[in-house]
Image (cartoon, helix red, strand yellow):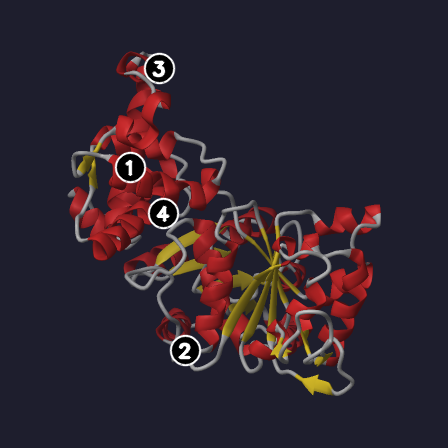
Amino acid sequence: MQHRIGLIEDDPIIGEALSERLEFEGFACDWFRDGKSARRGLGQRRYSVVVSDINLPDISGEQLFCDFLNGGQGQAPFIFITGYGAIDQAVRLLKLGAHDYVTKPFNVAELIGKIRGLCERQQPVVGAGALLGISTGMRHIEGLLPRLAASRSAVLISGESGAGKEQVARALHRAGDPDGKTPFVAVNCGAIPENLIESELFGHEKGAFTGANRERRGVFEQADGGTLFLDEIGEMPPSMQVKLLRAIQDRTVVRVGGASPHKVDIRLVCATHHDLKTLVEQGGFREDLYYRIHVIHLHVPPLRERQEDILWLTARFLDAMANRNGGRCTLTPEAERALTRYPWPGNVRELQHCLERACVLSLSPVLNVESLFGADAPSPAESDAPRQALSEHLQDCERTYIRRALAECEGRIADTAALLGISRKNLWEKMRKLGMADG
């Protein structure tokens, strides 16, 4: 796996020399010449190491580093380049969480050694073990999971319905419990009748109400020692929000009809497709509960904004159906193009159902556009009619072909380049030219 280094240096001589040396040493390198471009780049990609000068022409390296941490992107270790006059500032940055610093003039081989040592201690960003996707957004989320799993902070996952919020929650749980020894309990807050939600959350004692023939543990107690996933937390009735807040604060629940408190040790993960902050402003969601569950925020992008994941997910869904049903379905090139061009308003869930329906109903194991979309499938005349310049059409074809190769190689750049018969550097250049996210 090729590690990517973020280099932030305004001096053209130092910057060019370092970027060339890093690439010679086998690293991928993005060179930013000012703080503004670095801030944008750091927010769009995940880097194994960031090497930054402290003195930049627009903002200081210290301010950039603090913004990076405050934005929840602090997984990449920072190494700062400084002059002797700024050593005190470098030491202050170490206290804030920076990994190391070097002073000018510095030994390039020593700096490369520090970078290589940091990279060797990290897991690869993508590869055969990719859990959530190969797009930039999902790889960024996956890169955060080990750090989040090491803490017990509450996590709020936002995103459209069907985008994969529960899969992110499950991946976070697995990151903290790879052996599967602790429970993962999921409950959809919007699917429970209001008169039953307290019993569902906290449990009830025998005889607490009509039909309570035996005592029952609620989901808080069921998840004790593991993860409790409260999906669609924005649908929680106002009358229950204060009780939920108390349970989260105290990590203690009292069953309906009971008096004895029950201590619980849980990792709390909530999800919503609502804008909770707007709900708070409108009075539909308690502000204190919002801040209690909003310690760490992860946003799952809709599928239409991460096209690289469409064929990657398709391959996994088809594999799962083949294992379950015994017959394997494949796609024609036209069907693959149709999948990547469709906007998927229902997100990942709609893609999964589309493929499952096609595999069940199709008389052939090779799925075409009509198999996937039925009567709504565009006719060949419509889909092939020239609606753009030839250069744009060729770029679309090239972009689609590279996405297919990336999906087949599960995001591994070296393997993808080999499959396409080009060099790894050529592939990176093509992806940048085509505006493809991180690859």
Is the residue under label 3 in contact with that under label 2 (CB below 8 Å)? no
Residue shown at the point (69%, 53%) measured from the top left: 234
CA separation, marks 2 and 3?
53 Å
- Residue corresponding to mark 2: 180
- Residue corresponding to mark 1: 358
- Image position of 109 (left or right of 160): left
CA separation, marks 2 and 4?
31 Å
Q: Secondary structure at mark 2?
A: loop
- Residue corresponding to mark 3: 389
Of 124 and 181, nearer the camera is: 181
| Amino acid, disc 3 | Ala
Circle 1 crowding by C-alpha within 10 Å: few under 14, some 14–19, many from 20 = many
| Amino acid, disc 1 | Ala
Q: Nearer the viewer, mark 2 or mark 4?
A: 2
Residue shown at the point (46%, 37%) measured from the top left: 304
Which of marks 3 and 1 precedes in the sequence?
1
**Up/down of 125 relative to 431, above or below:** below
- Residue corresponding to mark 4: 439
Residue shown at the point (32%, 29%) measured from the top left: 338
CA separation, marks 4 and 3?
25 Å
CA separation, marks 1 and 3?
33 Å
| Amino acid, disc 2 | Gly
**Residue 80, position in %: x, y?**
54, 68
Quarter of image, res 369: top left
Q: Nearer the viewer, mark 2 or mark 1?
A: 1
Of 231 and 311, nearer the camera is: 231
